[in-house]
Image (tube, rainbow, N blue to C red):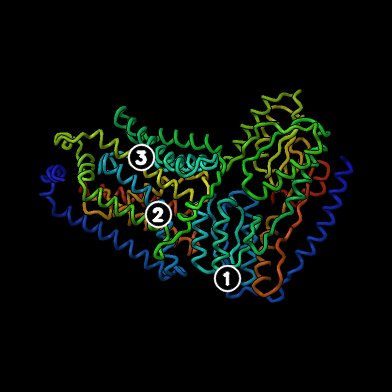
Amino acid sequence: MHQNVTITRRTLLAATAMITLAVAGPAVAQDKPLAGKVVGVTVIGTDHHWDLMAYQGQIDQLEELGAEVIALDAGRNDQTQISQIQTLIAQQPDAIIEQLGNLDVLNPWLERITQAGIPLFTVDTATPFAINNTTSNNYNIGAELALQIVQDMGGAGKVAVFNGFYSVPVCKIRYDQLMYVLQSFPSIEVIQPELRDVIPNTVQQAYSDATDILTQYGPDSGLKAFWACWDVPMMGATQAIEAAGRTDVRTYGVDGSPEYVEMVANPDSQAGAVAAQQPYEIGKQAALNVAAYLTGQPVPPFSFVPAVLINKENAGELAADFLPKQ
Amino acid sequence: MSALSNVKGPKSTRAGSKTLAKLAIRLGAFVAFAGILVYFAMTARGFTSPYNLMTVVEQSAILGLLAFGMTIVFAGTGTDVQRGGIDLSLAANAGLCAAVYAVMMREGYGNGLAIPAALITGMVVGLLNGIAVVSLRIIPLLGTLAVMNIAAGLELTLTENTVVSVSTPLMQVIAFGKFMGISTLAWCLIVVSMLLVWVMHFHRIGMRVYAVGGHHEAARAAGIDTGRYIYGAYIFAGFLAGVTSILIVSRLSSSTPGTGLMLLPILAAALLGTVFSRRFIPTIGGTLLAALFIGFLANGFQLLGISSYWVAGVQGALILLVVAVTSFAKNN
């Protein structure tokens, strides 16, 4: 098990190095390479810290590069986002960046963007219709977090999984990676049926679902972990564990929302670890890719922006950058 | 119609200033509509391009069809929208029908069973509204609110609050098909509008629905089985929710949570539509204009980079304004 972790860490380091090179690759020479260009940005919602940061990163960078930005926030409504994509197509912008949402809903419309001859870039959304997808390396994030759980659990016990967003590509990858890692540890059991995280009322719902699970699986049950593909539900789960007075169960999430990082950094909290991403940098990188493409430079099919696994041991050293701004 | 005009007859003698006020409001509504369109045309990039205009008509199809359902409920339960009936369950009903359709398709039943199942679901929810309002005499605001919760709960139970994806050739045609340069969704809006204008304004059934809504007692005295017509209005609204659900699933390639949020725009369209009619009553044509107006408003806001959150606020403000203005004109 330990060996496994080390190998993955080493691979991650190597990958990070390569990524940094890839990210640094399409540097843009001119001062305002996007002057006179119109770029559309469509995002499913900005109610979550990650979403807002990535969205803002795109807009700030695009404007800095001289582009006119049409930025549309669908307020977490699929119908609205489809309408907004249609409206963007009607505008015939020089490029469109799409961020998150349900891939099954989006794909036919992303195809329409490509068919209309508009270059499509995505943030955190793997689709065959995009020229480039800028994201964290979710394969690594998923595996790293899974291995952290295995390590903290001592290779045995029960884990409760929130799986409400399997149709969101990054969640699918992280979930699949978790299950792939757990295959090697047959003493770890995933509680069935799985839980469903929701939007909105994420924290409240997770609190109530986690409370039910904690009641059902008492201190001797072997329940040791809650997992979700992001960290907002884990805030609710952590509070539920602490309210139940349990110290045998920890939570694990992804994204690096400041409030959750704060919990992980707090030695008294039951928040175990978080894969903290750099959403603002991801947004900026997507904008740089648009600039590179529109000035005729080669753009790779995906750009990875490094993420950091913050756990109880390394939080003192790594959490500072991700904590709430005072 | 004769029942209706008899009822309204005596009132219309002291019309003078009242007629003038009504005319001013109607003209004002048209001028405001035109004014906002002209403003968008001058300021919003690409607003007047044919592709954009067609997009708005297409985007208005789903809202329009559901708003027609609300219009018919308004017409049948009290043309004075403040004192008459309402169907708060309409949007949630469409969400439930969409879930029924998508889940049945996922389970492999095929369009032949899934489409009728969605339509029947919609009509059953409409029937529930009828039972609550007509048979149990619960005030419509509460009765349909309860039914809305039932529908929303059933939708969540069916889909477990997840996205249920479906893809069929028929859905492709509905979402992306074109005929004579006009998209399928736009055709749906055009054809259903024409049919409903005929039924509601030129056919006996529609006249009677208006008679029942216009003056319940008079309609009953004239020998109309009013309860049956109110039941009918709710069930037909449910049927329209079923039809619309197929369009929603086609457009999104899935049933997704959140259809219930359409209630506010539906109400806004059906209420705003009354301003475009001569006697401030709900009409199909008025609702069509209002649905397009709301579509253009959302589109214009998007093009001008104004947050979509404002659209909800503006819809709420429109409802207040319309209800205030029409009740002022009626009581003047």
Q: Using the image, name the chain to which the residue with label 1 belongs.
A: A
Tags 3 and 1 on a common chain: no
In the depicted structure, whether residue A256 falls above or below residue A250: below
Q: Residue sitting at 12 percent across and 43 percent down? A: B6
Q: Residue A210: percent from the left, percent from the top? A: 65, 32
| Residue A326 visible in rendering | no
Foreground mark, 2 or 1, reads: 2
Q: Nearer the viewer, residue A115 or A170?
A: A115
For the residues marked 2 and 3, what is the alpha-carbon distance in whole angstroms? Answer: 19 Å
Q: Which amino acid, mark 2?
A: Ala
Q: Which residue is mark 1?
A: A94
Disc ID at residue B289? none
In the depicted structure, whether residue B108 falls above or below residue B176: above
Q: Residue B39: percent from the left, percent from the top? A: 39, 67
Q: Residue A42 sits in which quadrant?
A: bottom right
Q: Nearer the viewer, residue B92 or B242?
A: B242
For the residues marked 3 and 1, what is the alpha-carbon distance in whole angstroms? Answer: 44 Å
Q: Which residue is mark 3?
A: B87
Q: Which residue is mark 2?
A: B61
Which residue is farthest right?
A: A3
- Determine whether, in the image, residue A293 is placed left or right of residue A222: left
Q: Residue A278: percent from the left, percent from the top? A: 71, 55
At mark 1, the secondary structure is loop
Q: Which amino acid, mark 1?
A: Asp
